[in-house]
């Protein structure tokens, strides 16, 4: 029986582990990020993958740095046939990549080489892509630069947000890994190089990325709100109060409704003008309040009030590689 190690950290990784477990493919060792302070109380908390492993009594390593000699020694002694990573959060050095007989593989939530890096799901939504997917690749020392073994596309519904797409791609990754594992272990899956001319790199999101700029055209505003939910969360200011905007849809405006950011109440519907077109607010959340359906709370808002101008216009998540 072939042995393999799984490396991952967030819930995305646990969905893949669930699929492997259901197929009878149980890792001999799990590697995840160290416990981190979490919540308002800053309580030291194990990662979702660590909790998954603990529930199944699977030996788990939590290296601060994948270059630690002790970490290398532990993997060398196990001498696994394969290492599988998914959202692990650390780049592996060549010394670790050389350990498994069948190589190190990574599951990435985009159709590489498009959207390498930390925020591929959000980047696809912000760009308004209709299709994304997952890629299984051989790992090298670069950031998602290794040869591609398999890809599986996914057609994005028009109003799907980042949280929903995250779940869908995690499930797709699990299915892809289960389907390809036997062929990989037999050494019969061919890899091909990525086309560097098509490559792009995404960055980590910060909370300020969620600020909504209604001076953009409506499709961009809608896609931005989808991309920022559930984290860091899309938000805007109205009459000096901060509101999270959890869900929108494009509004079919046949004529200009007003200046960008202007709010219109139409039959209990909350419509906000953009530079071109408009978006309908479906669900909002006041600061320190609960999420509300707009059709229920629209009577609390004033027709013609204007969402404050965005304080930062650069919401680009993706930069084209220079070469």
Image (spheres, grey):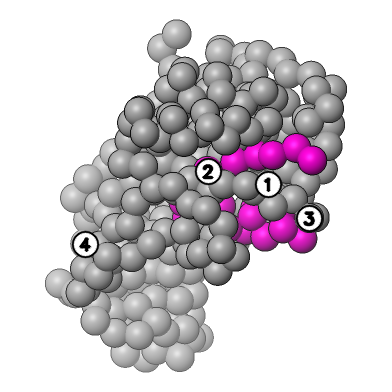
Q: Relative to residue 41, is residue 318 drawn left or right?
A: right
Q: Residues within 10 Å of mark 4 (few under 14, many from 20)?
A: some
Judge from the rendering whether residue 40 lies leftward or rightward of residue 100; answer left or right: left
- Rendered position, 188 above or below 262: above
Q: Which residue is tagged 4?
A: 308
Residue 253 on image: x %, y % = 54, 62
Quadrant where the C terminus sits is top left
**Residue nearer the viewer, 315 or 179:** 179
Does 7 lie within the magenta span? yes
Q: Which residues are magenta?
A: 1-22
Of pointers 1 and 3, the one earlier in the residue sequence: 3
Task: Give the Cα distance between marks 2 and 1.
Answer: 14 Å
Percent coordinates x, y for residue 56 in the rendering: 59, 65
Spatial CA distance of label 4 from label 3 is 54 Å
Among the 4 quarters of the image, the one containing residue 98: top right
Magenta-span inclusion, residue 317 = no
C-alpha gap between disc 3 and disc 2:
18 Å
Residue 264 in the image: above or below residue 308 = below
Q: Which residue is mark 3?
A: 24
Residues packed near mark 3 inside 10 Å, few (<14), some (14 to 19) or many (20 plus): few
Residue 199 image offset from top left, x and y in percent: 53, 21
Pointer 2: what residue?
7
Q: Residue 317: x and y, percent?
A: 39, 37
Count neighbours of disc 2 (C-alpha within 10 A) and say few if under 14, some if 14 to 19, many if 20 or more. Answer: many
**Labels 3 and 2: the sequence-earlier one:** 2
Q: Nearer the viewer, residue 56 or 203?
A: 56
User: Are discs 2 and 1 less than 8 Å apart at CB?
Assistant: no
- The answer for how far apart the CA atoms under marks 4 and 2 are is 44 Å
In the image, 58 versus 226, the foreground residue is 58
Q: Quadrant of residue 313?
A: top left
């Amino acid at each position: 029986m072939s042995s393999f190690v799984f490396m991952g950290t967030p819930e995305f990784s646990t969905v893949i582990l669930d699929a492997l477990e259901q197929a009878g493919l149980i890792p001999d060792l799990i590697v995840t990020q160290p416990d981190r302070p979490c919540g308002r109380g800053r309580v030291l908390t194990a990662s979702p993958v660590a909790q998954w492993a603990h529930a199944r009594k699977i030996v788990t390593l939590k290296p601060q740095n994948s270059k630690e000699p002790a970490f290398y020694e532990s993997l060398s002694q196990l001498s696994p046939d394969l290492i599988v990573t998914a959202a692990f959060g650390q780049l592996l050095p060549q010394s670790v990549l050389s350990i498994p007989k069948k190589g190190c593989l990574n599951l990435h939530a985009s159709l590489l080489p498009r959207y390498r890096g930390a925020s591929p799901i959000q980047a696809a939504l912000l760009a308004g892509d209709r299709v994304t997917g997952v890629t299984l690749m051989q790992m090298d020392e670069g950031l998602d630069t290794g040869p591609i073994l398999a890809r599986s596309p996914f057609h994005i519904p028009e109003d799907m947000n980042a949280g929903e797409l995250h779940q869908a791609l995690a499930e797709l990754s699990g299915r892809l890994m289960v389907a390809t594992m036997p062929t990989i272990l037999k050494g019969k899956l061919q890899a091909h190089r990525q086309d560097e001319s098509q490559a792009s790199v995404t960055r980590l999101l910060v909370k300020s990325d969620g600020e909504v700029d209604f001076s953009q055209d409506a499709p961009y505003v809608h896609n931005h709100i989808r991309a920022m939910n559930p984290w860091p969360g899309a938000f805007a200011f109205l009459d000096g109060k901060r509101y999270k905007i959890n869900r929108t849809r494009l509004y079919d405006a046949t004529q200009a409704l007003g200046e960008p950011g202007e709010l219109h109440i139409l039959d209990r519907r909350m419509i906000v003008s953009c530079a071109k077109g408009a978006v309908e607010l479906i669900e909002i959340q006041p600061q320190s309040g609960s999420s509300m359906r707009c059709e229920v709370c629209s009577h609390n808002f004033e027709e013609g009030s204007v969402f404050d101008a965005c304080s930062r216009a650069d919401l680009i998540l993706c930069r084209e590689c220079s070469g």
